[in-house]
Structures are given as structure tokens and as C-alpha cells.
Image: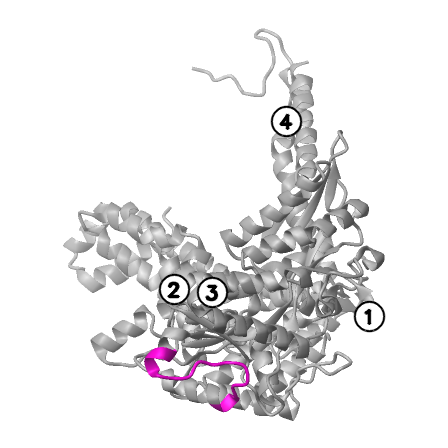
Amino acid sequence: MATTPLLSTAAPGRGKPRKRRRPGRRAEQWSAFGFAGPSVVGLGLFTLFPVAMAVVMSLFHWPMLGEPSFLGLDNFKYLFGEDPDFGVALRNTFIFTGLYVPLNVLVALGLAFWINNSRFAQLWRVLFFIPAITPMVANAVIWKLLLQPDGTFAYYLDSLFGISAPNFLADGRTALLSVVAMSVWQGFGYNLIVFSAAINEMPSNLLEAAQLDGATGLRKFWSVQLPLISPAMFFATTMTLITSMQVFTQPYILTAGGPGNATETLVMNVYQAGFQSRDLGLAASGAWILFAIILLITAVQFLGQKKWVHYEH
Amino acid sequence: MRQLRRAALALGAVIVAAGALTACGGDSDSAGGGKADDGTVTLDWEMWAGSEDEKAQLDHLAQMVTDANPKLKVDLRTAPFNDYFTKLQTEFATGEQACIVSMQSLRLAGYTDLLEPLGEHVPADGFDPASTAALNLGGKQLAMPFDLASMLVYYNKDAFKAAGLDEPKAGWTIADFENAAKTLTKDGKSGFGMSFSDLHTLSLLLSYNDAEPVTDDVKLQFDEQKMIDAVTWYAGLAKDDVGSVPASAADGGWGETQFVNGNAMMAVDGSWNIGSNISSAKFDVGVAPLPAGVGGSKTYVANSGFGVSKDCAYKDEAYEALQILTGSGAAQYLTDQGRSFPARTEQQPAFKEFLVAQDPGNAEAVSAAVDSITASLATGVPLFTTKNWDEVSKNMARYLIEVYTGASTPADALAAIQQQGARNQ
């Protein structure tokens, strides 16, 4: 059965369908613009325009109340030179990311495999996903209570192990670790769902074949199952990396960047520059440095995927 | 024909959507208020509130304005105190500020160009002179006061009785304070709840050795020697858990919260919290002036009031609303709620009556406590701050907590606060 080409408006029996296709094509294009229009307008107004403004603002001294004045690259020079907090914030962000991303992925991966064969897999998935959808501020407030001296953690450390707990959020050594722990608890659920879906998609014939060939346990896990879910792992790692570089809510609620600047992260530094020091130009430059770093890391990720991510053909 | 119609429909959709997007979020009224067709003016009022009780009190005040003048409505917006000034600055920057702006005397410096000087709209008498003085910067009266506050030591009467200690009273010294704190530290409870909030900490340091963080011409001097000595003493209270150290730099109200929860037996808190501390605590609460150091008992005096933003389109209505919000009717209402020591002298005795009514068995002690508030207000010093005080107080939190936990020395922490604060002062 011959299918009528969609664009043809030629009446049956008449020739020259091409001449009438062009006006139809243009109307189709206008129609496409029309449907995409609202989205593009929204994207332009609320994303592209502020981003472009931020580039402009980063070259100015732009106080919240008052007249902006051109500074050139002085904001960037200040951040990398005199600012006592920016370098520390950069370091803290990298430490946070370096601890959080592997922990998050490992916990999610491990639990995803573990519950995969359980009868209550769906129930486990729901339970583990609940922290990921609870508002971050609520989570942080509860964790603040748990981490207090004489709080729940301190109490159980003392009664079960006889260790006297440090003041988790006020001690510079444990403050960032506490923030990481809270973030892992909150965030692994999302990756768990992604991995669970990927594990369910693993073709069973491949796994059977591997089993028949003698690959069991760890060998099967490492050489067969992991490569099969490597696209999901790539997605999870990249997304988790990007969001962890932007961490703000957890340190803001838990420790307000303290003690000293032990838990101050890049976005916190940007927030302080913008809303405490009221210097929007400085905040914009900090934000753009963060953007550049995330772009670089993500580019490295994408370049590296050829080596370890196996897509099905 | 069909294609043209389709295209026209699509274009129309874009235009409507763009129009809707630009319209949403836009304010059709002028800054801070609006006028309805029947001539009723609605004024926006921005104020901080930390609980449902506080919000109910403010709603009542707003209603009093409409009761006095049915053509005048007040639309209340609130934010928690810790975020209030961040929100306020953002609103001023975007032109979204309210007509009636609540202001604290400590934050006045950042708003001198944004608030309309009230001049002749402030009544000549009725207000305690200390209350108007604290809201007067550079000769301009920037807000009308509704309260007047000094810092006090709140103490757990039951604990003092159980330990056989004399209750704190006017004239008690730093040595008495230290002794009480040490004696009351037992069974996992601390004698004193520490803080890094500006008024709470700086008032006690002032009383200890006259240490002042700001010079007379309003420049920061956190790193001067008296401050270092005072902070060294204060941080020393944390030894042996005598002072309960805040759990993190984000715990702004640590000392007083621990006190009300019964985990700390004493705390410094403002006189604005007398009513709520007494009703929230499950034990008998006593109040005393700050312990006397080398120069006698001293405290910082602060207060809050309401001002009118310069860009308010309905200034006359705003002045009228201000008269009612800070008038004797409103002052009487707030005093009956035990909100705070009133700025109006006429209502000040009623505040004492409120407290005595709360604690009739201790009428004498309570009266004495209020007398000590009055006395401290007479010798209290207003704290005038730099315009970046928000930033300075956040830095106080981050650096002082390191001193309390022993991770940093007072000299280093104060130097850091000074250096970062001096940049934008």
C-alpha cells in the first residue's frame, strides 16, 4: 500500500505537487515556531538574559543599591588574590565533591544490586527515595538536631561504644564530614532509582551466557554487569558531580559556613558576596568561575566516556 | 488558507504567552501600597515575626489601624528575624519595598538614604527619650519606636533554689555570676548558655570590662585589647562545660533556647523575650541585670520601630498609620501581651503589672527585676553600628565559635572579624 507523503497537498490526479509543497513547508515552520515560542521566550527571559547580564556584571562593581562602575577583571583578581574566603571555598567544594560523589554512587550502586533480588524491591526503592524528595531544608534542620552535642548520634556513640562524641558541627575537622554524610543520606535515593532501572534492563540472555561461560560473583559483576549499566553510571556520575559542585543548602542550614570557613562552599561564597556584602559584581564573577570549572569537569567526563561507557547498538 | 490560519494561530499563541510571561510578577500598584476605587488605601507593612503568636500580635496592630480609619488598610508581610534584613535589602534594590518598614536600631546605618526622615510627624512627648534617640541617626529621626530593650540575665529559679544559691539581683558581680554558673553545672546541664549574637555577647563583654566593638565615630574596633581580654574571659566559660557552646555557627539563638529548654541554667537574652520565655519555660524564670564588672553593671540598649520608605507613594497615609501603630492603644495592647518594655512612658508601669500578674507569688522580686530594667535603661548605651553590620554579625558567628571550641585564639578570631568588616564599613 502506497503511503501518501505527509507534505503532499496535491489532489489525486493532478501533477506538480512540488510547487504547492513550499508554502505548506513554511506554514509548518511557523507552526513549529509557534509551539516552541513560549518555551523559547521563557528560556530567553529567565535564563539566557540573566546569564548574559551576569557576564556583564562580573566586570563591574555593582552594589545592590547604588551606581555600578566598570572594573574590568578586578573582581576576578580580588577573588583569586585578596579574598580570604574564595580559595578556601574552592578547596572545600572540591573536598566535598571528592567525598560525596564516590560515596553517593557506591552506596546507590551497592544498594541497587542488593535489593534487586529481594521480594520487597519496590518497597525498598520507595523507602530509599523518600529522603531525596523531602525538602532539603527540613532534612537539614532534623540533621542539625541529630548532630548536636547531647543529640541522638552523640548519645548512641556514648551508650553503645563508650566514645565521647565531638561537637560535630562546631569542630572544624568533623563539620565538613557531617555535611557530606547528611548529603549522601539525602541524595543517594535518586541514583538508586536510576541504577535500579538500568539493572532491570540488563538483558538476561547475556547474563545467562556469562554464567554458562563460568563468570560468577565478582567477575560477573565487574566484567559483565557494570559495563552493561555503564551508561546509567555515566549519567549518575555526571549529574551528581554537577550538583555537588553547586552545594549550598546543606552547609548553609547546618553550619552557616562555619566554624571559621571550614564548610564554606563556592555557592555560599557567591551568596555572601551578593546578599551580605551586597556586591553583585563580585557574586557574578564567582558564579562564572564556578561555571567554568563545572564546564571543564563535564567536558573531561564526556571525553572520557569513550573509554569506559559501553552503549548498546 | 489552512496553512495561513495555522500560522496565524501559532503566532497568536506566542504573543499571548509572551504577554502573560511579562505580566506575571509585575506590580500594578505603586511602591509599597495601592489605592482602591472607593479611595481605600492599602499600605504594605514589612515586619519580622518568629512565631504564630508574634504574627497574631502584629495582625491585631494592623487591624487597629483600620478600626481607627476604615479607609486605611495595612497589609502585613513577615519574615524570620535572621532573614529579615537580607529580604529587606533585596526588596529595596528591586523597588518592592513596603511603605511601612520595620527597623531595628542596630541596622539603621544601612538605611539612612532609604527611609524618610519623620521630622515633625514624631510627637514631642509620650516616648521615652532613650527610645527615640536610638532610632535617630545623623540628626534624622528614621523610625518611630515601639519598644525599648536592654539585655538581661534570665535564670532558672528552681535550679538556684535546689542548689541553695542566692538569686541574682541588682548589684551582683561577675564573680557571683561565675560562681553560680560553676555550681549549677551538673548532671549534664550547663550553668550558662553561650551565644555569639551581637547584643547578647557584646552586652556581657561591655559589662565585664567596658569593651566596645565600635568607636564613637562608628568605626569597627573588634581587635582592641579590651575586646580581646573580654572574649578570652567569655570563651573561658566553656571550660568543663560550664558554658554550653553553640552546636554550630548557624545556631544564632543557642544560649536562650538552651535556657528555655532547661539545658542551661542561665542565659543572656533581651527584655523583649520576658513574656515568651516565662510562658515557654517549664520552670520558674527569674530576671536580673547583667553582672557588674569593673565599671558597674552595663548593657547595650537597642530597640525597634517603624519607618516610612522614601519611595512610598502614600506618605500621608503612612504617617497616620505610624501614629496608630506606635500610639498608646497599640502600646497598651503589646504591653498586655508582654511583648516588650514599651517605648511609651505611660505604658511602662503596665509592663511591670503584667510581669507581676504572671508571677504573683514573687511580686516583690519581679518588681525589683523591672526596676532593674528601668535603671539599666537609664544608664544603658545605644549600640550604633556600621552599615555592614549584617556581614559583621555573621562573621562573629563563624569566628567566635572557633574560640569557644578552642580551635582559635581570641586575638586571631577578632582580627579576622575586624579585617573583613573594615572593608565595607
When asked about the image quadrant of residue B350, the answer is bottom right
Q: Mark 4 — on which chain does it sit?
A: A
Residue at the disc numbered 2 = A143
Expressed as whole percent of the image width and height from the top left, the position of residue A87 reads 59, 77
Residue A297 in view, yes or no: no
Residue at the disc numbered 1 = B138
Sequence-wise, the earlier of marks 4 and 2 is 4
Q: Identify the residue shown where x is 42% and y is 71%.
A: B258
When asked about the image quadrant of residue B230, the answer is bottom right
Tell me the SS state at disc 1.
loop
Q: Residues within 10 Å of mark 2 (few under 14, many from 20)?
A: many
State the separation of the CA atoms marked 1 and 3: 35 Å
Expressed as whole percent of the image width and height from the top left, the position of residue B29 reads 74, 39
- Is the C-beta separation of discs 1 and 4 under 8 Å? no
Q: Quadrant of the N terminus of chain A?
A: top left
Magenta stretch holds residue B174: yes
State the separation of the CA atoms marked 4 and 3: 65 Å
Sequence-wise, the earlier of marks 1 and 3 is 1
The range drawn in magenta is: B160-175
Residue at the disc numbered 3 = B277
